[in-house]
Image: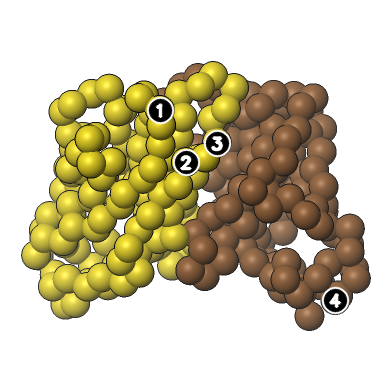
Chain colours: A brown, B yellow
Amino acid sequence: NAGVTQTPKFQVLKTGQSMTLQCAQDMNHNSMYWYRQDPGMGLRLIYYSASEGTTDKGEVPNGYNVSRLNKREFSLRLESAAPSQTSVYFCASSERGRFYGYTFGSGTRLTVV
Amino acid sequence: AQTVTQSQPEMSVQEAETVTLSCTYDTSESDYYLFWYKQPPSRQMILVIRQEAYKQQNATENRFSVNFQKAAKSFSLKISDSQLGDAAMYFCAYRTTNFGNEKLTFGTGTRLTIIP
């Protein structure tokens, strides 16, 4: 099915470990996003990429890095995981200049112990 | 910066009844988009309904409709004939129309419980 694919769906890390969350979309969207969801705080933007080769910080970028590998793929890296990064992470994509909102991946539940 | 406020952390409604979820937002822009997303226990984010600010007519999608009050910066979601499958977190979201800046700003969500 067409859409946004995120891997992994679940992950447990120890404090200080690193990992990369992968995201790929097959809808030829230009824009891609990474959000984190925490109880009582809604979804907050970590980083986004308006087009291939560009990335920009969102509301909560500290502790994360991103790579827009090509038009399809947008990865999120935690270099040294902290318990404060325990969250559900969503990748999304959208058309530029279009009205239709985002298409979301199914999310990654990350626990840092 | 735009902000979105959902003042009802939790709501409940009897099955088959009608419920309204509130959302207010703050912006200095005259044109923008507004959305309601549903997040069931599966965690998937599902677009429920969308509204273009320049359109005065309220959007409707089957049992879901909005009450868009631009002057009041209010965008409430009405769910009619509530069904057990409507139980979920509901998020209101704002998006600018500025080309190249399609970021969505979300509210904190309202958890809707359906009482059988």
Residues marked 1 and 2 touching at CB (< 8 Å)? yes
| Quadrant of the snapshot with the C terminus of chain A | bottom right
Quadrant where the N terminus of chain A is found in the figure: top right
Residue toward you, B30 or B93: B30
Q: Disc 2 designates what residue? A: B2
Nearer-N-terminus badge (1/2) = 2
Q: Is residue A54 above or below residue A109?
A: above
Could you say which quadrant of the image residue B108 lies in?
Answer: bottom left
Q: Assess disc 2: are there few (<14), some (14-19) or many (≥20) residues with their C-alpha within 10 Å of its C-alpha.
A: some
Q: CA distance from mark 4 to mark 3?
A: 31 Å
| Numbered circle sitting on residue B29 | 1
Q: Are marks 2 and 4 in contact (CB under 8 Å)?
A: no
Neighbor class of circle 1 (other Cα within 10 Å; few <14, some 14-19, many 20+) is few
**Alpha-carbon span between mark 1 and mark 2:** 9 Å
Asked which secondary structure carries label 2, the reply is loop
**Mark closest to the chain's N terminus, 3 or 1:** 1
Work out how far the residue at label 3 is from the one at label 2, CA to CA, in angstroms: 11 Å
Residues at discs 1 and 2 both on one chain: yes
